Every structure is written in C-alpha cells, then in structure tokens.
C-alpha cells in the first residue's frame, strides 16, 4: 500500500446496492476504486464499465489483486462472513454491508481475525456518520432535549418484493424487516443511549410466500422464511428504553420515524437510512416544532472514506466491526425473544463512538 494518494478499493458483489456505492466512492477523492468482482463475472464487467472502474472479474481475482487495500463486501448477508474472512486472509482491510454476518459466532470471529492481522474491519450502516444524525448527536449532547429517556422508531412498507428484481435473500435468514432495516435504527439508537442490554419482541408472518412484482422474474413466487412483522422494546446501558416496529406487511408506507424524547423536549431525527434531512424539536408546553435543516455531502460509502483515512493515520474508524457485532447481537436477541416468547439479554457491548469533527467532508481530498 502506498503511503500517499487515495486508498485503493475493490468491490465484491455487483448487485443493486453496488450502484449507489460505486457512484459515491468514485466521487470521493480519498478512494480509488480499482476492481469490481462478482460470482457472475459478466455482471461485474457490466457494472465496472458503467462506473468507469478499470478492472473486473472473479472474487478470487479481487482477493489476489495486489493494488487493492480495502475490500468493500456487498454480497448477500449469507456470504458476508466467508467473503470477509477470505479478504482478511488476503491481507485486505474489509468494509461489510449490513448486517456484518448472519450469526454471532462468525461475526465475533471476523473481529478477532482482523485484530490479529492488524487490519481494519468495518460494517454498514454508515448513515449515522452523515450530517443528519451527526447534527442530532450534537444537539442532544449539548442538552437541547435534556436527558434522553425514551425513543420510538418505525419502518413500515409492503416489502421489497414489490420493487426488487431479486428479493429472495430479503425473505431468508439475515433478511426480513428486522435484519435488513433494523441495523439503521439500532445503530442510530446506540449513538444516543449506548449499548443495548436486552430486548423483548414479538413477530408475525402474513403469508408463507411473496410474488416478485418487477423485473425479469416478475410473477415468480418465492418462499418467506422469517417474520415479516416485528415489534420490540429495547433497554440500554444508560437506562434508556426504545420501542421499534419493523414491517414488510404494511400498505401504508411509513419510513424513517426516529424520535428521541428527553426530560425537556422531543427530537424527531432524519430517517436513519438517509444521510441528511430536517431535525424537528418540540419542547414541553410548546405548540409548534422548531425545525433545523441539515445538508451536506454524504452517501453510502462515507464509512469507507473514514476507514481509508484511519488506515493512513493509524487511527480508528467509526463504524467498526465491534459496533456491527453489537447491533447484530441485539437483532438476533430480538429473534431469540420472538422464538422463546421471553425477555432476551444482549451480552455484547460496544464502545462509545466519538462524533465526527464538525465540517468533516468525504468529498475533500486529505490523503
């Protein structure tokens, strides 16, 4: 790895989410995307051509590529552990899409493998590094709502089978509204309340199958293997309590509800799946919300920029593997609670993540 200039990146997984990552990472001057790989090399070739990436091919070619420092792992959740472990074994730093893996053992093993090799391991979501949730943190930490007490988060849609051309994995283990969307909300909540210590949840499944609505497979029926409706109550080490509802069953679309109530006010944060948006605050006794707009650069892949800068400075990035493990642990504890119909403790803990410096800009050239 060179000591100056942008950090080089290889992407594994040329599915739909790769389009957002590549469009953004190509615009971040501290990153240099050199290679795209996929199980279907022809798909990798097409995506590489579309985004002007010079190299493409097989997964093994990406792992063997001498001029790739970070592997951005955009495979389906069931493949996260295997691909990430192979990349670490090849001496690459790794950024995983969420969830970090689909089980606790493999997630913990990745953290241990990365630390033993002296490599960085990160995990989406990186939305909490965007101007929206970073501004939320600063407002809360300066006392604008008093002491944070409770939270309510909501994600309701009919389900991704309506629009996704290949939604199978979203209805299998590692998917569903909880494992697919829950990481955004629970990661955001840890930035306010710290580590999650326990959960009680209930879940349901409307139908055992869904029918793909768009794309070349439209009309194909796929199996549903997970709860498509989950509601849960989480407790945190700071004493906070949060209620969350996650659904792939709702004709009413309601996404991005993320409200924090403190001793003096309630704050409605931007959608934790987005990087910017309005923040609204209403104080006790007030009749109207105060609105604080947030704007600025940021999109999927800013966590990779943060990691690249940490690599060069021998520092620590924000969206760490340990944070990803903790969020996964809490999500799987929710599944445990649903299955056992009882309270489930969350055994892991995560370090408090410092806020980014004000003015932190992924579009700035720093390396």
Image: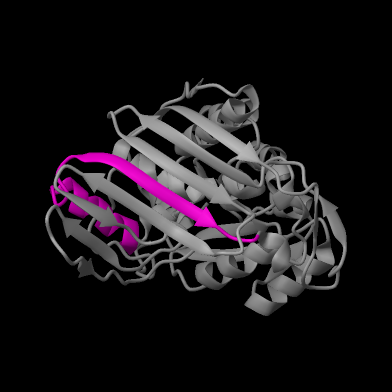
Q: Residue at x 47, y 21 (%)?
A: 347
Is residue 144 found inside the magenta-colored segment of the image?
yes
Whether residue 315 can be seen here: no
Q: Nearer the viewer, residue 333 or 128?
A: 333
Image quarter (top left, top right, bottom left or bottom right) of the C terminus: bottom left
Q: Nearer the viewer, residue 193 or 145?
A: 145
In the image, taking residue 254 as reference, residue 238 lies left or right, namely left
Look at the picture and state if 84 lies above or below 76. above
Tell me where residue 50 appears, x and y as whole percent: 68, 78
Q: Is residue 335 above or below residue 9?
A: above
| In this picture, residue 266 sits left or right of residue 256 | left
* Residue interval drawn in magenta: 131-158
Q: Write the residue at 86% across / 58% down.
A: 221
Q: How is the image coloured?
A: one colour
Q: Is residue 47 left or right of residue 291?
A: right
Determine whether 347 is above or below 182 in the image.
above
Residue 86: x, y in percent?
A: 70, 39
**Image location (x, y in percent) of residue 287:** 16, 64
Specify whether residue 204 is in view: yes
Horizontal and vertical percent position of residue 3: 43, 54
Residue at screen point 60% across, 30% down: 338
Q: Nearer the viewer, residue 26 or 118?
A: 26
352 relative to 366, above or below: above
Q: Residue 140 versus residue 155: which sits nearer the camera?
A: 155
Write the residue at 49% across / 37% down: 232
Number of callouts in the render?
0
Query: Is residue 28 within the magenta segment?
Result: no
In the rendered image, which quarter is residue 320 located in?
A: top left
């Amino acid at each position: 790895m060179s000591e100056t200039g942008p950090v080089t990146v290889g992407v594994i997984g040329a599915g739909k989410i790769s389009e957002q990552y590549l469009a953004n990472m190509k615009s971040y001057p501290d990153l240099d995307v050199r290679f795209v790989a996929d199980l279907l090399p022809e798909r990798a070739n097409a995506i590489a051509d579309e985004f002007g990436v010079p190299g493409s091919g097989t997964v093994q070619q990406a792992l063997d590529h001498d001029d790739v420092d970070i592997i951005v792992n955009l495979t389906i959740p069931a493949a996260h552990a295997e691909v990430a472990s192979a990349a670490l074994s090849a001496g690459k730093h790794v950024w995983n899409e969420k969830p970090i893996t689909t089980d606790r053992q493999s997630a913990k093993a990745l953290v241990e493998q990365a630390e033993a090799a002296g490599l960085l391991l990160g995990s989406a979501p990186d939305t909490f590094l965007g101007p929206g949730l970073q501004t939320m943190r600063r407002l809360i930490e300066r006392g604008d709502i008093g002491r944070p007490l409770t939270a309510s988060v909501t994600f309701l849609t009919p389900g991704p089978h309506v629009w996704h051309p290949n939604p199978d994995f979203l209805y299998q283990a590692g998917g569903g509204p909880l494992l697919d969307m829950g990481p955004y909300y629970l990661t955001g909540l840890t930035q306010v309340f710290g580590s999650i210590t326990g959960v009680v949840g209930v879940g349901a499944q409307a139908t055992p199958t869904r029918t793909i609505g768009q794309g070349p497979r439209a009309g194909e029926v796929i199996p549903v293997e997970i709860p498509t409706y989950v509601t849960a109550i989480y407790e945190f080490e700071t004493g906070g309590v949060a209620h969350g509802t996650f659904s792939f069953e709702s004709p009413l679309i309601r996404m991005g509800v993320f409200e924090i109530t403190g001793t003096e006010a309630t704050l409605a944060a931007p959608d934790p799946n987005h990087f910017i948006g309005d923040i609204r605050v209403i104080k006790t006794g007030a009749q109207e919300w105060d609105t604080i707009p947030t704007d600025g650069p940021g999109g999927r892949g800013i966590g990779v920029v943060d990691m690249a800068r940490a690599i060069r400075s021998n520092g620590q990035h924000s969206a760490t593997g340990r944070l990803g493990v903790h969020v996964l642990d809490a999500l799987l504890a929710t599944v445990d609670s649903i299955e056992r119909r009882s309270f489930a403790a969350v055994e892991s803990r995560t370090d408090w993540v410092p806020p980014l410096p004000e003015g932190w800009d992924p579009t700035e050239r720093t390396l």
